[in-house]
Amino acid sequence: MSQVLTLWQKSTTLPVVGPLVGKRVFSFAFSQMAPYFATIRPRFVEIRPDYAELVIPKRRGVHNHLKTVHAIALCNGLEAAMGALAEATIPADKRWIPKGMDIAYTAKATSDITCTAETDPEQWTSGDPDLPVRVKGVRDDGTVVIEGVIKLWVTPRS
Protein backbone atom coordinates (compact mmCIF):
# COMPACT_ATOMS: atom_id res chain seq x y z
CA MET A 1 0.00 0.00 0.00
CA SER A 2 1.30 3.48 -0.83
CA GLN A 3 2.50 5.94 1.78
CA VAL A 4 -0.27 8.38 0.88
CA LEU A 5 -3.01 5.77 1.25
CA THR A 6 -1.49 4.48 4.50
CA LEU A 7 -1.28 8.02 5.93
CA TRP A 8 -4.88 8.70 4.85
CA GLN A 9 -6.19 5.53 6.47
CA LYS A 10 -4.24 6.08 9.69
CA SER A 11 -5.07 9.76 10.05
CA THR A 12 -8.80 9.29 9.41
CA THR A 13 -9.21 6.41 11.85
CA LEU A 14 -7.34 7.73 14.89
CA PRO A 15 -9.75 7.35 17.82
CA VAL A 16 -8.22 10.23 19.79
CA VAL A 17 -8.74 12.96 17.18
CA GLY A 18 -11.60 11.57 15.10
CA PRO A 19 -12.02 11.50 11.33
CA LEU A 20 -12.64 15.25 10.84
CA VAL A 21 -9.43 16.33 12.57
CA GLY A 22 -7.59 13.41 10.97
CA LYS A 23 -8.65 14.60 7.51
CA ARG A 24 -7.41 18.10 8.31
CA VAL A 25 -4.07 16.73 9.53
CA PHE A 26 -3.73 14.64 6.37
CA SER A 27 -4.63 17.63 4.16
CA PHE A 28 -1.95 19.74 5.82
CA ALA A 29 0.65 16.97 5.54
CA PHE A 30 -0.19 16.34 1.87
CA SER A 31 0.20 20.05 1.14
CA GLN A 32 3.67 19.98 2.66
CA MET A 33 4.77 17.20 0.30
CA ALA A 34 4.06 19.54 -2.65
CA PRO A 35 3.99 23.01 -1.07
CA TYR A 36 2.23 24.74 -3.96
CA PHE A 37 -0.91 22.77 -3.04
CA ALA A 38 -0.98 24.67 0.26
CA THR A 39 -2.01 27.83 -1.63
CA ILE A 40 -5.54 26.44 -2.07
CA ARG A 41 -5.77 24.92 1.45
CA PRO A 42 -7.27 21.64 0.21
CA ARG A 43 -9.54 19.69 2.52
CA PHE A 44 -9.45 16.04 1.50
CA VAL A 45 -12.76 14.22 1.79
CA GLU A 46 -11.94 10.77 0.45
CA ILE A 47 -9.00 8.85 -0.98
CA ARG A 48 -9.10 5.31 -2.26
CA PRO A 49 -7.63 3.49 -5.25
CA ASP A 50 -9.03 5.05 -8.45
CA TYR A 51 -10.73 7.95 -6.64
CA ALA A 52 -9.83 11.09 -4.72
CA GLU A 53 -11.98 13.99 -3.58
CA LEU A 54 -11.11 17.29 -1.95
CA VAL A 55 -12.69 20.68 -1.33
CA ILE A 56 -11.16 24.05 -2.17
CA PRO A 57 -12.63 26.55 0.29
CA LYS A 58 -13.79 29.77 -1.40
CA ARG A 59 -11.81 32.50 0.31
CA ARG A 60 -10.10 35.73 -0.65
CA GLY A 61 -6.72 34.05 -1.20
CA VAL A 62 -8.04 32.07 -4.20
CA HIS A 63 -10.27 34.79 -5.70
CA ASN A 64 -9.92 36.32 -9.14
CA HIS A 65 -11.08 39.82 -10.09
CA LEU A 66 -14.71 38.60 -10.10
CA LYS A 67 -14.44 37.30 -6.51
CA THR A 68 -14.91 33.73 -7.74
CA VAL A 69 -12.37 30.91 -7.36
CA HIS A 70 -9.54 31.57 -9.80
CA ALA A 71 -9.09 29.22 -12.76
CA ILE A 72 -5.55 28.27 -11.76
CA ALA A 73 -6.66 27.56 -8.18
CA LEU A 74 -9.22 25.19 -9.69
CA CYS A 75 -6.51 23.48 -11.77
CA ASN A 76 -4.35 23.24 -8.64
CA GLY A 77 -7.22 21.47 -6.84
CA LEU A 78 -7.72 19.05 -9.72
CA GLU A 79 -4.01 18.28 -9.79
CA ALA A 80 -3.93 17.70 -6.02
CA ALA A 81 -6.85 15.27 -6.30
CA MET A 82 -5.16 13.52 -9.24
CA GLY A 83 -1.88 13.27 -7.33
CA ALA A 84 -3.56 11.69 -4.31
CA LEU A 85 -5.41 9.24 -6.58
CA ALA A 86 -2.21 8.36 -8.44
CA GLU A 87 -0.26 7.76 -5.24
CA ALA A 88 -3.09 5.67 -3.76
CA THR A 89 -3.53 3.58 -6.92
CA ILE A 90 -0.26 3.06 -8.78
CA PRO A 91 1.30 -0.40 -8.56
CA ALA A 92 4.54 -0.51 -6.55
CA ASP A 93 6.61 -1.37 -9.63
CA LYS A 94 5.54 1.76 -11.56
CA ARG A 95 6.00 5.51 -11.37
CA TRP A 96 4.01 8.41 -12.76
CA ILE A 97 4.45 11.99 -13.87
CA PRO A 98 1.87 14.44 -15.21
CA LYS A 99 2.14 14.89 -18.95
CA GLY A 100 -0.61 17.38 -19.74
CA MET A 101 -4.00 18.75 -18.89
CA ASP A 102 -7.07 19.36 -21.07
CA ILE A 103 -9.56 21.45 -19.12
CA ALA A 104 -12.81 23.29 -19.84
CA TYR A 105 -14.13 26.03 -17.56
CA THR A 106 -17.89 25.58 -17.68
CA ALA A 107 -19.33 27.95 -15.04
CA LYS A 108 -18.31 30.53 -12.43
CA ALA A 109 -16.84 29.05 -9.26
CA THR A 110 -19.01 30.98 -6.78
CA SER A 111 -18.80 28.64 -3.76
CA ASP A 112 -16.46 26.09 -2.22
CA ILE A 113 -15.43 23.68 -5.01
CA THR A 114 -15.36 19.90 -4.68
CA CYS A 115 -12.62 18.48 -6.91
CA THR A 116 -12.63 14.82 -7.90
CA ALA A 117 -10.28 12.59 -9.84
CA GLU A 118 -11.21 9.14 -11.15
CA THR A 119 -9.67 6.26 -13.07
CA ASP A 120 -10.62 2.67 -13.82
CA PRO A 121 -8.57 -0.17 -12.26
CA GLU A 122 -7.57 -1.67 -15.62
CA GLN A 123 -5.90 1.58 -16.66
CA TRP A 124 -3.10 0.95 -14.16
CA THR A 125 -2.38 -2.60 -15.33
CA SER A 126 -2.43 -2.07 -19.09
CA GLY A 127 0.84 -1.76 -20.97
CA ASP A 128 -0.07 1.71 -22.25
CA PRO A 129 2.04 4.40 -20.53
CA ASP A 130 -0.57 7.08 -21.37
CA LEU A 131 -3.09 7.18 -18.54
CA PRO A 132 -5.92 9.73 -18.64
CA VAL A 133 -7.37 10.75 -15.27
CA ARG A 134 -10.91 12.17 -15.37
CA VAL A 135 -11.19 15.31 -13.23
CA LYS A 136 -13.92 17.79 -12.39
CA GLY A 137 -14.79 20.56 -9.96
CA VAL A 138 -18.34 21.12 -8.71
CA ARG A 139 -20.00 24.02 -6.88
CA ASP A 140 -22.09 23.50 -3.75
CA ASP A 141 -25.27 23.59 -5.89
CA GLY A 142 -24.02 20.69 -8.08
CA THR A 143 -22.98 22.79 -11.08
CA VAL A 144 -19.79 21.59 -12.78
CA VAL A 145 -17.41 24.57 -13.03
CA ILE A 146 -14.37 22.80 -14.47
CA GLU A 147 -13.86 19.40 -16.06
CA GLY A 148 -11.39 17.55 -18.18
CA VAL A 149 -8.52 15.09 -18.23
CA ILE A 150 -5.07 15.12 -16.69
CA LYS A 151 -2.74 12.93 -18.71
CA LEU A 152 -0.18 10.85 -16.83
CA TRP A 153 2.90 9.06 -18.13
CA VAL A 154 3.15 5.78 -16.23
CA THR A 155 6.33 3.71 -16.65
CA PRO A 156 8.14 0.89 -14.85
CA ARG A 157 10.42 1.95 -11.97
CA SER A 158 14.03 1.75 -12.97
Image (cartoon, rainbow, N blue to C red):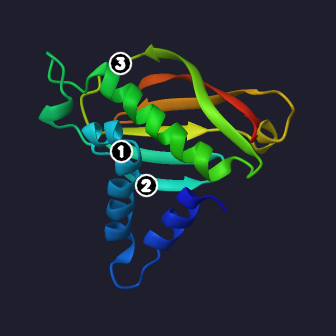
The earlier-in-sequence mark between 3 and 1 is 1
User: For the residue marked with disc 3, what is the amino acid?
Assistant: Ala
Amino acid type shown at disc 2: Val
What percent of the width, then of the height, locates residue 70? 26, 22
Q: Say which residue label 3 marks.
A: 107
Q: Secondary structure at mark 1?
A: strand
Q: Secondary structure at mark 2?
A: strand
Amino acid under disc 1: Val
Mark 2 or mark 1, earlier in chain? 2
Can you tell which mark lies on residue 55?
A: 1
Q: Toward which corner of the image does residue 21 lie, by quadrant?
A: bottom left
Q: Tell me the distance, in whole angstroms, between the alpha carbons under discs 3 and 1.
A: 17 Å
Residue at image point 40% right, 26% down? 75
In the displayed structure, would residue 149 be above or below residue 121? above
CB contact under 8 Å: marks 2 and 1: yes
Instruction: Provide residue 62's location: percent of width, then percent of height.
Output: 21, 30
Q: Is residue 153 visible?
A: yes
